[in-house]
Amino acid sequence: MDAVPEPAHYRLDDQIGHLLRRVYQRAAANLASRLEPHGLTPVQYAVLARLAETGPMSQNRLGRLVEMEQSNIHGVALRLARRGLIRRSRDPDDRRLTLLVLTAEGRRLVDALIPISTAASAATLAILAPDERAALIGLLRRLL
């Protein structure tokens, strides 16, 4: 079992959760500033990008794939549908499920935003050498 540091030796800046939160905030702000002219939040972009990657799926499954609560994915999907970026329909095999699919307009927007998202990630990681970037991404995936 790992030793617990004494209070005098505890530093918040050494705690993984604190560090990850701060890095996340920086990365999210970087992406948000680039998406703002397109009227999207990072979460809305994640929903559109995941639909572009995987194709149509249930709202519940999409929520799980982008790590969102069911009530939150519902609101995001409604806003994106109002903008004409996704289409919502009932699953013909299970009427309890809402299916989501990108519209042609949604696909065009995702395609235009991929380079912007890639640039935001690159800016966040710019301080690291290429091998450090790859190592960090690999370690974060292992933690998931």
Image (cartoon, rainbow, N blue to C red):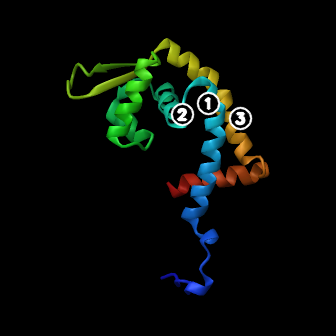
- Closer to viewer: mark 3 or mark 1: 1
The front one of 97 and 29 is 29
* In the image: residue 111, left or right of residue 106: right
Report helix, strand or loop for mark 2.
loop
Q: Residue 119 carries which label?
A: 3
Disc 1 residue crowd, few under 14, some 14–19, many 20+, Cα 10 Å: some
Badge 2 is on which residue? 41
Residue at the image position 71 percent from the left and 35 percent from the top: 119
* In the image: residue 44, left or right of residue 63: right
Please tell me whether residue 128 is drawn above or below residue 65 in the rendered image. Answer: below
Disc 2 residue crowd, few under 14, some 14–19, many 20+, Cα 10 Å: some
Give the mark, 2 or 1, whose residue is nearer the N terminus: 1
Give the mark, 3 or 1, whose residue is nearer the N terminus: 1
- Marks 2/1 in contact by CB < 8 Å: the verdict is yes
- The Cα–Cα distance between marks 3 and 1, rounded to whole angstroms, is 11 Å
Residue at the image position 53 percent from the left and 31 percent from the top: 45
Number of callouts: 3
Residue at the image position 57 percent from the left and 63 percent from the top: 18
Q: Please identify the quarter of the rendering in which residue 14 is found.
A: bottom right
Report helix, strand or loop for mark 3.
helix
- Marks 2/3 in contact by CB < 8 Å: the verdict is no
Kindly give the residue lying farthest to the top in the view shown.
104
The front one of 51 and 11 is 11
Disc 3 residue crowd, few under 14, some 14–19, many 20+, Cα 10 Å: some
Where residue 115 appears, as percent x and y from the top left, is: 68, 28
- Closer to viewer: mark 2 or mark 3: 2
Q: What kind of residue is marked 2?
A: Thr
Please tell me whether residue 70 is drawn above or below residue 55 in the rendered image. Answer: below
Residue at the image position 58 percent from the left and 69 percent from the top: 15
Report helix, strand or loop for mark 1.
helix
Badge 1 is on which residue? 35
Q: What kind of residue is marked 1?
A: Leu
